[in-house]
Amino acid sequence: ENGHQNLAMVTCTAPVNIAVIKYWGKRDEDLILPINSSLSVTLHQEQLKTMTTIACSRSFQQDRIWLNGKEEDISCPRLQSCLQEIRRLARKRRNTGDPTSDVSIVSNKVHICSVNNFPTAAGLASSAAGYACLVYTLSQLFGVEGELSAVARQGSGSACRSLYGGFVQWKMGEWSDGKDSIAEQVESESYWPELRVLILVVSAEQKSVGSTSGMHTSVKTSQLLKYRASVVVPCRMEEMIRVIRQRDFQAFGELTMKDSNQFHATCLDTYPPIFYLNNVSHRIISLVHRYNQYYGETKVAYTFDAGPNAVIYTLQEHLPEFVQVVRHFFPSEANGSEFVRGLPVCSAD
Ligand code: 2P0
């Protein structure tokens, strides 16, 4: 008998997302429920993405996973949450008698292969694309439809936002079971075709404090984070959605920079403090403000996640000049081919 009879295989891709209103802090660490809502822009499919292939067969003895070619431990609790949750949804569908669902394969073991087309170590939101892709690919394999962001969220909080393109909000929700803590598209990828993102890879080193443990310490110790989550972010979410709908780059850019700065201020307010930005990050911040001051308007905006790399938002018309300016002021860094990566955010077609 052919040992791979009944082999089913699906391949999908998911892009990275970059938050403009940041998620930092959980109210429930097991279900991954945040203390505030957040909003991000999903990058273009072909740029920074994860590609995942999942095979399942009666002949597989156990679930297994390979990340960028290296086998990893499948018993990781977050992986287990996603696998269990998708299998539960698949069985539920079968029990409700959906005639199109393939009931037999849900009980088979899976082999998962996931690769990024960018360096994982560069701190470029690899877990977001990774878990979004894992959950989506599993859902395709097992024929699960509907709301998947609550499943992806249990892999990594920011992953729920990568299930949608364009401008995406993750609503924090109120319920303790997390069923209302889901991602929703605010506007599609074609809504603001002139918007561009530029990634300045300041350091490809692994970050010193991981997001999960960093935000845990921030929730325990930062007074500023409490104020941010309860007072600042609710207002900013409304304002951000409004300025995106108006395609108002000046307001979008200013709010994006302020929110990045407040996120890093809460890191500094954490005890012991967490430093994600380095000297090059600080020089990029100064350069962006000097550039905008020169023109008397916000033409470019920066945002930084849990690491020193800068993500620049700008409009297509300003991109070539700003890239020149970066290369001029960072000649040594910019000579490295990886320093400047200009990427379209939204597809024009
Ligand atoms: C964000 N970050 O909104 C923020 C901004 C980093 C800074 O989401 O513990 O990897 O897996 O839920 O999603 C990074 O945190 O953390 C993150 P977990 P995650 O993009």
Image: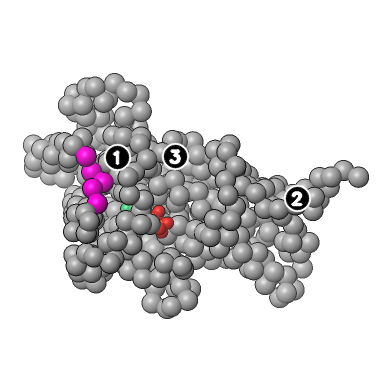
54 in magenta: no
Residue type for callout 2? Phe
Q: Residue 41: x percent and y percent?
A: 36, 51
Q: Position of residue 70 (x, y in %)?
A: 57, 38
Task: Reply above or below: 96 against 222.
Answer: below
Looking at the image, which residue is at 45% across and 49% down? 127
Q: Is residue 264 visible?
A: yes
Separation of residues labelled 1 and 2 (CA atoms): 41 Å
Q: Main secondary structure of the magenta part?
A: loop
Mark 2 and ligand 1: say if the CB distance to the nearest ligand atom is below 8 Å.
Answer: no
- Whether residue 259 appears in this view of the structure is no
Q: Is residue 277 within the magenta segment?
A: yes
**Which segment is the magenta one?**
274-278
- Label 3 environment density (alpha carbons within 10 Å; few <14, some 14–19, many ≥20): some
Q: Nearer the viewer, residue 113 or 327?
A: 113
State yes or no: discs 1 and 2 in contact (Cβ < 8 Å).
no
Q: Which residue is mark 3?
A: 120
Tag shown at residue 309:
1
- Residue under numbered circle 2: 60
Q: Where is ligand 1, by quadrant?
A: bottom left
Q: Position of residue 211 (x, y in %)?
A: 35, 53
Q: CA distance from mark 1 to mark 3?
A: 13 Å
Name the amino acid, label 1: Asn
Sequence order check, earlier mark of 2 and 3: 2
